[in-house]
Amino acid sequence: MKMPTEVKIIRSPRSMQDICLKLRARGKTVGLVPTMGALHAGHMSLIARARRENDVVVVSIFVNPVQFGPSEDYLKYPRPFSIDTGLCRAAGVDMLFAPGAAAMYPKGHKTFVNVEEMSNVLCGASRPGHFRGVATVVSKLFNIVLPSKAYFGEKDFQQLAVIKKMARDLNMPVKIVPCPTVRESSGLALSSRNSYLSPSERGQAAKISQALSLGRRLFHKNKITNSARIISSVTAVLKTIPGVRIGYVKICDPATLEDIHTAHARAILALALHIGNTRLIDNSILGDVVN
Amino acid sequence: MKMPTEVKIIRSPRSMQDICLKLRARGKTVGLVPTMGALHAGHMSLIARARRENDVVVVSIFVNPVQFGPSEDYLKYPRPFSIDTGLCRAAGVDMLFAPGAAAMYPKGHKTFVNVEEMSNVLCGASRPGHFRGVATVVSKLFNIVLPSKAYFGEKDFQQLAVIKKMARDLNMPVKIVPCPTVRESSGLALSSRNSYLSPSERGQAAKISQALSLGRRLFHKNKITNSARIISSVTAVLKTIPGVRIGYVKICDPATLEDIHTAHARAILALALHIGNTRLIDNSILGDVVN
């Protein structure tokens, strides 16, 4: 294991790219973990895997303005940079790429990458432009860091599907590595946005993973394949959360994101909801046997 | 000078990318000349420059379906592949990347790159989706061939402007190298589409460069800076071509493509027209003293 020493902090996209071009020309493999910071154990599991699989590990921390809607939480999104730096150092990260918004989107930026259709459903339906913003910034990060592998959490499963599709459609020379969602002991999926929850909201949020478990049980043990019936039972559990607003509960294809009416084991049970002002998402492979 | 030997023909995007990833890992520089084939002396000037400036030269030949409109000339676009191969061999090209349409756009392709605003003006106004198709295929070619430099002709000046903007906005690790338009002795800019012209149309097409020369003279010698006056004189010359349909005559900014009302030496005088069924474009820097 690599000893925790210094992590090099790089702010300039051009400098980062120059370093990575040189690493590539020397035959080194680079693993990239793109994040918006506020690192938690989910991110750390991506970093640990990147550390095992690459010569050089780059973590990017960039709260990407173009993936936030005008009424969303861009300004209040947590930015505990020095804590994040310490976590990266301890995890043996080589370089932390942390550009400013003006360096990533200079005045007059006009170019966007869009994965059509897949960007307008599920979370995209209530967050117009969000996945266009995600695809654009990930394209930029890939061009700057030139990773051979890039690591993404399965919690953001639509993001993962959009990025996989983008990488394949545009022949990006990078392997997209999905990593399992990390959960609290209560079952709550780790998310930087969990910090917005009050203690009582946090307690209630445990019902999200209980609802997903119920969905899996209905499919597995009760052999229910009618998606509408599973969705309605899952929704009923979520509705017991005080002050909840449900965005969607869907059963869909993991690659195309299209609705699946007769459920099968590879289908994704996905949901989005607000508890108070906090938007949370979670998902599960329907055939997953874990609990 | 490298002796003309064999040129390796590669059809598969994956194979091409594997080769180029290995070249990059060995520190080699790759120069890419993206073309739609039907190579002429304009293309050959790009190839010659790429040959001088890179360890390895890749020419791509791909008639890109997504940049053609439904009523355009995708099917009849010339495809003299064995002649093109001979020209590449003679010019010392190392690899010719010539994928099929299904290899580049497998069923279900959904991802597009768009340089907003710049894609809807000038040629883009009458060719909706054209520059989105260009930006998308060039992104794909860059990801497959991983060039350090890519060469584009100035005849297609809007394409060049869109690609330069895309490369900058998305931090693509490639230098875009513009190369001067090559002309027949009559002044006609070389274009693969010139082959559509009848002998008499070809004679008339010489008036295009005469009209551009007039525009430059009005600016240079007559000190006219009112763009509308220059445009009107240029248009008058073009109208003497029998059967002409003028698309546009514009004076615009070379980087943003915005109209310029008071002309200056760096402005671009650009035009598009049909002679019979053949669409031709040409342009000139207004302050260019040549001729």
Image (tube, coloured by chain):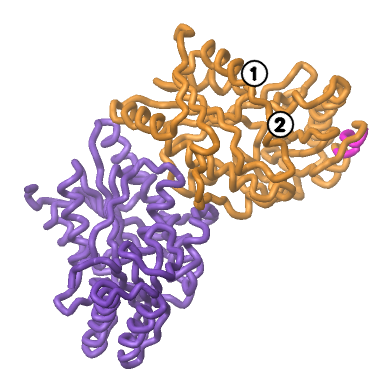
Chain colours: A purple, B orange
Q: Name above or below for residue A40 compared with residue A217.
A: above
The residue labelled by disc 2 is: B76
Identify which amino acid the numbered label 2 is placed on.
Answer: Lys
Parent chain of label 2 = B
Separation (CA) of disc 2 from disc 1: 21 Å
Q: Say which element carries label 1.
A: helix
Look at 38% across and 80% down and name the residue there.
Answer: A229
Would residue A194 be seen by someone viewing this image from the given angle? no
Residues in magenta, as a range: B235-240
Residue B238 covered by magenta stretch: yes
Parent chain of label 1 = B
Would residue B179 be seen by someone viewing this image from the given angle? yes
The answer to which of A273 and A12 lies nearer the viewer is A273
The residue labelled by disc 1 is: B41
Q: Say which element carries label 2.
A: loop
Look at 27% across and 64% down and name the residue there.
Answer: A37
